[in-house]
Amino acid sequence: MRARRSVWTDEAVQALLAQFVTVADEVGRLQRGEDAECAVFKSFCEQGHYGGRMEPTGTRQGIYAVAPSGRFLASINHTDPQRVAEMLRTALQRWQELPEAERRLDDEQVKKLEGTKRFEDRYPGDGLVLAEYLRDLDAKGEQRDWRTRAWNEDQAWFTRDEAASMVPERAEVGATADVPARLVERLARLHLVDSVRGQTPSFGKQAVVVAELQSEVVQVEAQQVHLRFVGKTHVETKGRWVITDRGEPVDHERGVRTGLSGRAVWDRASRRFVSFELLASGERWGATQYNGRPADLQPTPIGFGFVLAGKDHPRVAPAFWWDYELR
Amino acid sequence: MGADIQVEGRAAIEAVGRALRGVRAYSADPPRACGAPIMLAHFLLVPLLAALPQDAPVDDFARQLAAIVPSGDELAWRSVPWRAELRTALVEASRLPKPVLLWAMNGHPLGQT
C-alpha cells in the first residue's frame, strides 16, 4: 500500500491527474454488487488489465481511466509512476478521440446512479465520526523496510444517540458513565484489529474477553463538559486458517489486548462532541492471510489512535460496515 | 485556542514525532494541491491541538497519539482530490465533462486496505 500511495505524489502523475475527476473506491463491492454503480464498474473492468482472469485471484484491483459513460479508456495495476503516467496519457488521448455523444451519462443513467444505496448513506453527520489510525509501537527493523513504518486507518461511526450514551447524565465533576458494552465491543471487534500491514478479518462476538470503557467528568465550563475515558479490551480467537498469502490452513490463534485512555469535550447545547481523542495501546499476536505477520506471531506492541474526523475527512464506510449495528 | 497556541502546540507535537519515529511528524510545508492543507488542519491537527492546555508542554497522551497519527509526508498522496464513491464521480464528471480516474483496491484506498 505504501508503494501504491507513492505513485500519487509523483509530479508528472499529479499534473496528468488534474485532467481527470479522481475517485478511490473499494473494489470488492464494485465487483460483487448488483446495483447501477457496480454494473458500470463491471462493464469496464473486464476490458482492463485483469479482464477474464480468475487465477491466482479474481481481484480487479487497479487504476482505471473511463469516460463517465463507462467507456473504457485505459487501465493498469502498477506502482511505477512512469508506467501510471503513460497509462494516463493513453487514456487522455483516447478521451480526445471519443465522440462527444459517447462521453456522458444520459438522464436515465444519472437517475439510476443517484438512486444506488451504499452504507455511506448512513453517515452519522449529527453523531460521532472518529478517524482511526494504527501502527506498531516500538517497531524494530530498518526504517527503509515498509513493515517498520507501516500504518493503516479506518473510521469509527456512532449515531447521535450512541454518542450521547458515552456521556454521564450529570454534568458534575466526578460523575461517571459506563460506555454501553455494545459500543465498546464495536471498537474491540471491528476496530482494534491488527491490520497495520494489511487487511485482516474482524473478531466475532464470541472472541470478546473484555470490552470496558468508562467516562468521567473532569471539568465543566458553561455548556462544555470535559471528559476523561479509561478502559480496556481483550479479544482473541483460536481456529484453523491460512496465515500466509497463498498458504495452507494451520491451527492458530490471534488476538489483541489494549488499555484505553482518552479525553473529549461534549457540548451540551449542540449535544455533540467538539473534540475527541482516544488511545488504545497494548499488544497483538498471531497472523491472518493478508496481514503480513508470518514472522511476527508472538505478542508485539501496537497502538491505535482515534481523533475527531473533520468535515473534510473522506466519507468512507468503516472497514467492517456489514457488522455495524447503528442505533 | 489562539493561532499562536496552535503553532506552539503543533511544533511541540512535531518535535515529539521526530524523536519517536525518526521522521517528521507533520510536514511544516503541507503537501501540494487543494485538499491536503485543509484535511491536515481539520482532521489531524485541530482536534489534537484543541485539547492541549495553554502553556503546557506536550503531555504523555499527546506524545503517544502523535506517534500513531500519520505525518504530513505519509499523507502527501491525499493532495489528490479523491472522491470516495464511484457513483458521485461519474455523475460529476459527466456534467463537466471530464474522464474519470478510478483507484480501486481491496479495502477502500481512503480507508483500511
Image (tube, coloured by chain):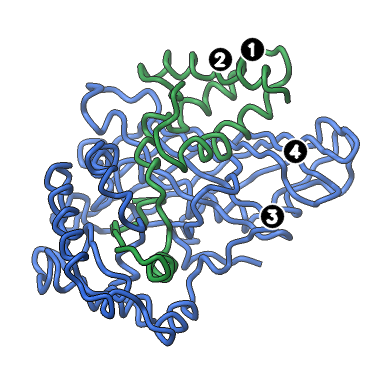
Chain colours: A blue, B green
Q: Chain of mark 2?
A: B
Q: Which residue in the protein does label 1 denote?
A: B57
User: Mark 2 or mark 1: which comes first in sequence?
Assistant: 2
Label pair 2/1, CB-CB below 8 angstroms: yes
In the rendered view, does A106 fall on the left or right side of A208? Answer: left
Q: Residue type at mark 1?
A: Pro
Q: Nearer the viewer, mark 1 or mark 3?
A: 1
Give the alpha-carbon distance from disc 2 to disc 3, as whole Å.
35 Å
Density class for disc 3 (Cα within 10 Å; few <14, some 14-19, many ≥20) is: some
Q: Residue type at mark 3?
A: Pro
Label pair 1/3, CB-CB below 8 angstroms: no
Q: Nearer the viewer, residue A323 or B42?
A: B42
Q: Which residue in the protein does label 2 denote?
A: B12
Density class for disc 2 (Cα within 10 Å; few <14, some 14-19, many ≥20) is: some
Density class for disc 4 (Cα within 10 Å; few <14, some 14-19, many ≥20) is: many
Q: Which residue in the protein does label 3 denote?
A: A180
Q: Which residue in the protein does label 4 denote?
A: A265
Q: Are marks 4 and 2 on the same chain?
A: no
Q: Secondary structure at mark 3?
A: loop
In the rendered view, does A228 fall on the left or right side of B100? Answer: right
Q: Are marks 4 and 1 on the same chain?
A: no
